[in-house]
Amino acid sequence: MRLIILLSGLLALILAATMPVSADEAELRAVIAKFSEAKKFSQTEAVIEELQALGDTDAVPTLNALSDGLLQVRESDGAVFIIKGDGETVDLLDPLTREAAGTAPGADLRKVKVKNSIRRLIADVVSGLTLRARNSAVRLEAAETMFSRPDPAMIATLDGVIAEETDAGVKTAFMQARAAAVLQSDLPEADKLDAIALMRDRGGRDVLPILTAIGASTQSDAIRAASREAIASIEESMMFWDAGQNILYGVSLGSVLLLAAIGLAITFGVMGVINMAHGEMVMLGAYTTFVVQEFIRTSAPWAFDYSLAIALPLAFCVSGAAGLVMERGIIRFLYGRPLETLLATWGVSLILQQAVRTIFGPTNREVGNPSWMSGSFEVGELLITTNRLWIVVFSGVVFAILLLVLKRTRFGLQMRAVTQNRPMASSMGIATPWVDAFTFALGSGIAGIAGVALSQIDNVSPNLGQGYIIDSFMVVVFGGVGNLWGTLVGAMTLGIANKFLEPYAGAVLAKIFILVLIILFIQKRPRGLFALKGRSVEA
Amino acid sequence: MITGFLFRALDRKAILVALALMAIALLVPLSNLYLPASHPLHVPTHILSLSGKYLTYALLALALDLVWGYCGILSLGHGAFFALGGYAMGMYLMRQIGTRGVYGNPVLPDFMVFLNWKELPWYWYGFDQFWFAALMVVAVPGALAFVFGWFAFRSRVSGVYLSIITQALTYALLLAFFRNEMGFGGNNGLTDFKDILGYSVQARETRAALFAATAIALALAFVICSGIVNSRYGKVLVCVRDAESRTRFIGYRVEHIKLFAFVVSAMMAGIAGALYVPQVGIINPGEFAPANSIEVVIWTAVGGRGTLVGPIIGAIAVNGGKSYFTAAFPEFWLFALGALFVATTLFLPKGIVGLVSGGVARLRTGREADRIEETLQPEAGAAE
Amino acid sequence: MNFIRKTMAGVFASAALAAATLVPSAQAQEDTIKVGVLHSLSGTMAISETTLKDVMLMLIDEQNKKGGLLGKKLEAVVVDPASDWPLFAEKARELITADKVAAVFGCWTSVSRKSVLPVFEELDSILFYPVQYEGEESQRNVFYTGAAPNQQAIPAVDYLMNEEGVERWVLAGTDYVYPRTTNKILEAYLKAKGVAPDDIMINYTPFGHSDWQTIVSDIKAFGSAGKKTAVVSTINGDANVPFYKELGNQGISASDIPVVAFSVGEEELAGLDTAPLVGHLAAWNYFQSVDTPENAAFIKEWKARMGENRVTNDPMEAHYIGFNMWVKAVEKAGTTDADAVIAALPGIQAPNLTGGMSTMLPNHHITKPVLIGEIQDDGQFEVVSETEDLVPGDAWSDYLPESKPLKSDWVELNCGNYNTETKTCLGGS
């Protein structure tokens, strides 16, 4: 019986491939209803294949919902629905029309289980069904799926689709998918040479394996030569892109370092306070983000995308306040004894870590990426992840603002005056103790802002700060104390150097090399890259 | 000259401390071995091994005090020298396991066997001999300190910068020793020791002997340090700490003076590490962690830096406290430790010794107190 | 003279402080049986181990509600080894000699276990170790209730090979002994299965690695060679969150390159937005989502005690099994004496939370089912494959040349590393 269904399915598939058939809606519903009995993965697969056999594009939403785990069965009567929302009761949608079909308690629903191989099957089926979809983006996606899993059996279908296709971009994609399939088929040499030429034009990393495979398996010298040549040309351009990608990674790592270090550049660089609790200020910022997101999740879920914007000023205030308290309570008694501030702030860092551990628990807390910070896009062969991009932009903005504050505001002027000549500044009427306090608060607040950004790419755990403290000190010392530009150059240099070393030496050795390089560099220039000149340095 | 050195070294204070340590070295192991467990003065074995560990920490703190308290070099990487000494000893102990490892390989340590190493790396040669290992315990940290100090002091890296690059040094070593390719056992380090000089490391007698050896080493180190700081060289050392430029202008080679102290201190730290490993039974890269090195500074600060006795008291007191708090208030001991750091720097800038002598000084204006006052005061001006 | 007094006073004061620490904290009461809990509550490992301390306290409370053990109440002695390995040894010694605990439940990392091993051997006490580990060890005083490599890694690879058709393998791990050994075993296993050396990529990263850009893009490049590729991840703890975030952001979905992890459980996922990770896999012997009455009861109790949003995970189940086995063994032996309990333990059966009965084997490992789960968007796993029978833990891997001839049997041979070729018990104990 099963065999007959399968055979008829295959027949229908062939038919579906050549001409779009719209199956009877009742028939479709009958097949979809079978999901309620599919308890094993193999049964689910059989039902999907039946849907494929019907060849009706109306089944696509159902299949996509299944892939996303949203296709669920109401236990009480075995009806199949697409669900929406979560919680105690969920909304039910009709699996075909997606019209509202009432609600049901979550406990009454059972998910139709899927796993990776089923998701892949669904993707293949969906791409087969959507070759003629109205939306060109959907067709493009179908073409890409076919390209990534080429199947010679589809060549004829693709020929038909290509002939009908009007959108130039989608048409190229279909032709490339066809070419990939051709290279796996036993079509004559001329077709394959054309296909290789198409592949060469497409370029990119995912073409290389296809070309390598054909070059290795073919009998024909012409094909081998063509594929070898195509590979060489693609690899050449890839080298260029790879270098670009490395620089990009380096800039992204550099901007993370910059964010982590820039607060320190103020507290350590400008004020000369060795703040070992700097990392914990970053951590406080990250936890502030967590608290903000928790609050939004429970009381205003629609505002989730703005959570970071809300968290930024709060994190600045929380960490800044912590810094202010620290300065007033501890550090002001220790000016002129930098090595002792090191010890005291180390103590503070232990206390803060344990406090966070006691309040929030020792485990990682979840900080979500807002939708505008998820995903990635490609520029040529460069892959740019959105969250990294935002962090690069963000660190640039923070840097610029800080520079403005220091150079263009009254507070910045006072700050510089105090650091350059304290007695003179004091006799000019500047309240030096408060300038100190607010400078320290500013440095800490910036660290808090960095924490908001770092919460997007790293763990939010009590150990968060520890991971950055040594790197931050390295950046500041390397760049030159007391100079924001030095910090910028230092962070970028270290980031990029690290990323260029990493492919050759591995992540660990790269880091060791960098540390050794910094140690050697300090011997050469004991005051860092951009050393302050003048009297104040020698004091 | 040596007699002169010893004569100066053995001032009243040094004699007393050395004698006290010698007495501890003798009495504690004897009490552990020969007094019945019910006797009120019996020292149980676990306290013995714990105290042995504290004494190695005390030796490390003493080594740090020589460079920090007397020369103004705040090293945040002394844990590295300690760990290197420990590794040298650990390598000897590994080689002593011989065929008693889990795979029964006569030459290769277990971790090399299961990483499929076929032969012993060259740097492991010689460690089956105790004399060689003992030499390496001082030579490796000494050499590293020499090279590092040579460059750093010559280019006049000082103060905070020096602290930070010593931290970078120990961090780089931490990462390096974590790598399994290095052939030092990676994260697990060296462990599962059996024998030292033919005696089982687990035997009570061996533990007692190790304790005695540690106490004696500490006493010797104390005498040596005391000799150094009371010598002419020691006076110059304090000059360097208090006014480096002036000392240089007078005509002293400041970098040589610093280098000597740094190397001696590193060697002492190496010995401390070597004594630590057989008593604790494990050495792994965690010892290189910058946090550990910072803790050493804390012990020294709590006890009172620039006093030689202070670091010993500090190391024992802080670690005793740590042992107590981690058992009694496991959730809160970091608060206590953190508060201790803050309180020490704010209220006890001269540490416990300073507190005690200060208190005594207020009662009767003693010469002693002034002297300590003197040695401690000028630090502020020297550092940045 | 005053200096002498000062110095001596100082020395004595600190010695007294040191001694005070070591006097048993509670005066040894005769009517309780003490159980040591040796898990880090601070430092880097607190993130994983604190939960295990909580679960031990819960299990002990439960046992006391049932009337205790041998007519006595159980008393937990909790200490904090602070993720500091030598401190583990010190604390173990303190628990055994000063607190006189009957057994210790603890450790997470291999290095902490290695650090305490000699102490347990010397003082002849019992340690229950609840975490999956690299094997290559069997010690008389230690009972390994976590998975050995054959109870986790190999079934996971089998699943990928058979169900997902994976032909190309990335073995990515943190650079320490567990990933190293596991990857060695897997490499040998894959080669034995006919995988070409070119199709295996091995990568190690340091602890807490947070910048995964290069490695993830390497994996992506490696995976675009036309053959189905999977990542077998032995990446440890903290480094996982940025790793998965980078995977999600670089658009690697589970249906392209699935990642099967051996160190990522419910607890780790709790710190992550799992929506982009749906379909990635983990291999464990227990998942919170397993639907059995025992598990439901366990979860209910845990949530009632710790809060609604706390999750359960595999090492917690290991403690559950281990603790119940210990209780049964003590009842069988009629005493908490270590030698008697060690002799009684092999053969003891205790229910696991996935509906089976786990047995303590003569090699001090236990039998466990192997489950493969896919990550769901709610931070839970859904079981996609489960072994038919319980898999017995194998201390010595058959895929490493040096350990192949070794066998562990504490009942018949009284040896943890018996060489079946030379018929001798090799060194050690």
Image (tube, rainbow, N blue to C red):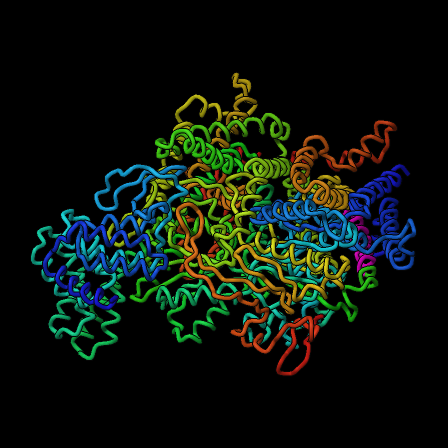
For image coordinates 7% across by 58% down, the residue present is A163
Residue A502 location, x and y as percent?
42, 57
Residue A444 location, x and y as percent?
50, 32
Quarter of the figure that contains the C terminus of chain B: top right
Viewer-proximal residue among C396 and A267: C396
Viewer-proximal residue among A513 and C13: C13
- Magenta-drawn stretch contains B217: yes
Image quarter for residue B28? bottom right
Q: Is residue C33 left or right of residue C183?
A: right
Residue B313 location, x and y as percent?
78, 43
Q: Is residue B206 left or right of residue C197?
A: right
Quarter of the figure that contains the N terminus of chain B: bottom right
Residue A121 location, x and y as percent?
28, 59
Q: Is residue B224 visible?
A: no
Query: Is A339 above or below relative to A160?
Result: above
Query: Is A308 above or below relative to A527?
Result: above
Image quarter for residue A275? top right
Q: Which residues are magenta?
A: B210-231
Viewer-proximal residue among A358 and C294: C294
- Magenta-drawn stretch contains C49: no
